[in-house]
Amino acid sequence: MDRDEILEKILMVVIVILVIVVGFLVVEGRKKDEQIKQVVSVSNKIIENVKYMELTIGDAEAREIRYKPAVAVFDESKLNVMEDMINTGEKYEFENPTGFDDIPMAYLYKDDGEIIVISAIDNFEDDEEKGNFIIYQTNKSEVKRIYKVEDEVGEFIEKLYNERYDDEILLYYGYELQTSTGLQALMDMPLNDDMTERYMGKYNQYSKNKKLKQIEVKDYSETYEGYFVVEGNDHIAISEDYNPIPRQSKKLKRVPDKIKESLSKFDKVEVEEIDLNGDKELEYIAVGSTEDTSDDGKIMSKVVLYNKDYKTIGTLASWDATEDLKYLPEEVVLSLDDVVYFDINNDNKMEILMELPAYETSLINIFRYDNNVLYGEKDYEVSLKP
Ligand SMILES: [Ca+2]
Ligand SMILES: [Ca+2]
């Protein structure tokens, strides 16, 4: 081979390599486009069929890290804005996924019972890009994704929260309740001018099944240093003027056979009927309880929601109090007296508010029912253990 032939061969090899590299890049580029398309189509589906969202943000005034009471948003136009924001997102990988600031938060409740959690996060890798990342997780899978979105989603949530927060106050005895589903402790509130001022004013007060009277909250009492409860309300009260009890519950004289069967391990069963969601079909809330205080006896109870055909929709709570005996001053079971039906957000659908005992406090578990789905902290097992 002379010199020219060698050069020609080298040139050929270089051309072949170039062709391979260019081809590879084109394929990779297509793959990337494909990936982006997939991400967009996935993200397009993220909040389809969302019925409502719940928002909470960090309380800057509080002396400790805590969240403000969550508020629920049903406004479709706001849901659409949120949807648009998410759909502008591109999947994003942080180089160093530590130190996320994961407030504020939005919980998106879908028709089929799926709950998606969205957090606005700051990217500490780059100060310029603060706040325009979201992270989402769903209760239906292990999926946890980070998206970079164009809008300041954190700012949006905060603004929306503040608009909604001013709307309504829901008081349960001396405490403010969140208008969101799930468990919350009846907690004394951190004392500062904004907070105490917020609660003063007129409220409509209700018992389990009827309106009582209008009250005016004028005072609060400091419970321990830096914390307070509202004075003057010994029931449930709302600051807004609407009918939170559009339908009444009624205790049944006779327990339906199917419910009796489903709670057959309990000595006693009590049932109330009510149309929670206003579709003219009745729902049933039943409490099964056993209070056998003999030496080998059992003390246990369970609260279950059934649909019109007596099919179980979900268990709200259960309590095997036998295990808590040494913490109990006396025998206790869950009962229908612990359950209140109340439309806490003026959408004509009544939420279930269930008071539950807990170690050194009480919890409120709020459930929302619609389309055969029970939203909230289901299957809650009461325990009085520290
Ligand atoms: Ca119903
Ligand atoms: Ca409601």
Image (cartoon, rainbow, N blue to C red):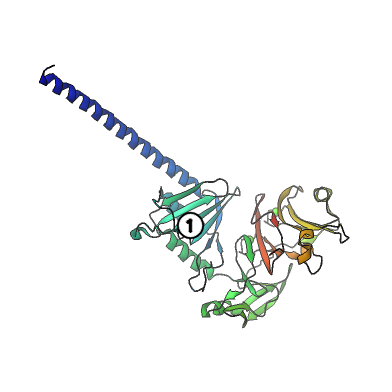
Residue lying at 69% horizontally and 68% vertically, measured from the top left = 362
Q: Is residue 64 left or right of residue 234?
A: left
Residue 340 is drawn in which quadrant?
A: bottom right
95 or 256: nearer the viewer = 95
Whole-percent x, y for residue 164 in the image:
52, 66
Q: Residue lying furthest top in this view?
A: 1
- The answer to whether residue 282 shows anywhere in this view is no
Whole-percent x, y for residue 64 in the image:
52, 71
Residue 99 is drawn in which quadrant?
A: bottom left
In this rendering, is residue 274 above or below 232? above
Q: Secondary structure at mark 1?
A: strand
In this rendering, is residue 20 above or below 247? above
Label 1: few (<14), some (14–19) or many (≥20) C-alpha neighbours in 10 Å: many
343 or 379: nearer the viewer = 379
Q: Is residue 154 left or right of residue 329?
A: left
Residue 81 is drawn in which quadrant?
A: bottom left
Residue lying at 48% horizontally and 62% vertically, measured from the top left = 104
Q: Residue lying furthest right in this view?
A: 294
In this rendering, is residue 46 above or below 57? above
Location of the N terminus (image quadrant): top left
308 or 41: nearer the viewer = 41
Tell me which amino acid carries mark 1: Ser
Check disc 1 and report the residue beneath it. Answer: 119
- The answer to whether residue 122 shows anywhere in this view is yes
Whole-percent x, y for residue 8 in the image:
15, 22
Location of the C terminus (image quadrant): bottom right
Whole-percent x, y for residue 208 in the image:
73, 67
Instruction: Classify the position of ligand 1 by quadrant: top left, top right, bottom left or bottom right.
Output: bottom right
